[in-house]
Amino acid sequence: MYWVIFLKEKKNEIEKNKIRNFIIAVILLICTYLIIVFITESDKSFSRELPVSNMQNTANNETKEILEKELYVIQNISENNEAYEINIYYPFTIDDELNSYINTKLDLYMKDIKFQASKFDEEVQEGKYKLNISFNSTKGNNGYISFIFSVTQDIKYLHPTETIFVINYDSNNKKIIMQEDLEKIYPNLYYNLSEYTYNELLKRQDIQEMGALDLLKDGTRPNKYNFMDLAFRENSMFVIFEKYQVAPYILGHFEIEVPLEKLV
């Protein structure tokens, strides 16, 4: 009889632990999401409370010579210890303000992964916390350059989070292009993007087969939060939709190219 009671209590304890761990995982996932939202929307500098040793770039003579001919040189940050791995590739340009803005974004991601890794316990989990960031660039009209950053964070819960952020730059006027600048250039920006991208995505067979039309409708509503990731190509702007935004996760992210004449 004692063993029966003991086993029942043990089973109840295990079930409680499962529920507790699930709740903790959900809370951590929500916190990570909120941090990512803050990163993508924040345009201000912050005090560097944690040292980031590899972010101190200096334009040596060789770099300056390259930048006279090229838009940027590729820099790498790599940190590796028992708790976390960080591997970042990013552009270093001739514009100090742009470099500072890029570094500010990257610093936030690095601080986040280091904070998450501070709870690392090798006795209860396998593998390290990981942060990987890469980028590519595109050129638009009037000297516009878009830097598209792909971010993967593995914080040991569920699957790794994959996000994107875009930095647009006007190389002719040496100016970072903010969201509000695009709103002034294209007064009906969100309504035009909403209509065009919704109709284009509606043609996709994989989205039709998933039957997630409510998700598509919500993800393309005309507001700035749905159109945070905008980049330029020649004669067009393309919209990047994150995973989960307009379709189930399994379909990945989507890029829709919008001719500039559709925005006016």
Image (cartoon, rainbow, N blue to C red):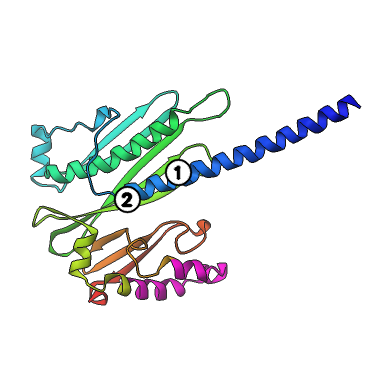
The residue type indicated by label 2 comes to: Thr
**Residue under numbered circle 1:** 31
Q: From this viewpoint, is residue 1 visible? A: yes
Instruction: Give whichever of 19, 96 is nearer the camera.
Output: 19
Query: Considering the numbered disc 1 on the image, is that residue within a helix, a strand or a loop?
Result: helix
Residue 209 figure quarter = bottom right
Q: Is residue 144 left or right of residue 16?
A: left
Q: Quarter holding the N terminus?
A: top right
47 relative to 249, above or below: above
Return the mark for residue 126: none
The residue type indicated by label 1 comes to: Cys
**Residue under numbered circle 2:** 40
Question: Residue 79, how many percent across, how many down?
Answer: 34, 28
Q: Which residues are magenta?
A: 193-218
Residue shown at 40% from the left, 32% from the top: 115
- Residue 194 is covered by the magenta coloring: yes
Question: Residue 143, how many percent across, how many down?
Answer: 13, 59
Report crowding for label 1: few under 14, some 14 to 19, many 20 or more residues within 10 A (C-alpha): few
Q: Is residue 185 left or right of residue 227?
A: left
Residue shown at 38% from the left, 37% from the top: 112
Question: Residue 238, how many percent across, how many down?
Answer: 30, 64
182 relative to 187, above or below: above
Dominant SS of magenta comes to helix
Q: CA distance from mark 1 to mark 2?
A: 14 Å
Instruction: Give whichever of 92, 42 is nearer the camera.
Output: 42
- Residue 116 is covered by the magenta coloring: no
Residue shown at 24% from the left, 49% from the top: 43
52 relative to 106, above or below: above
Question: Residue 239, how many percent across, how many down?
Answer: 33, 63
Instruction: Give whichever of 99, 204 is nearer the camera.
Output: 99
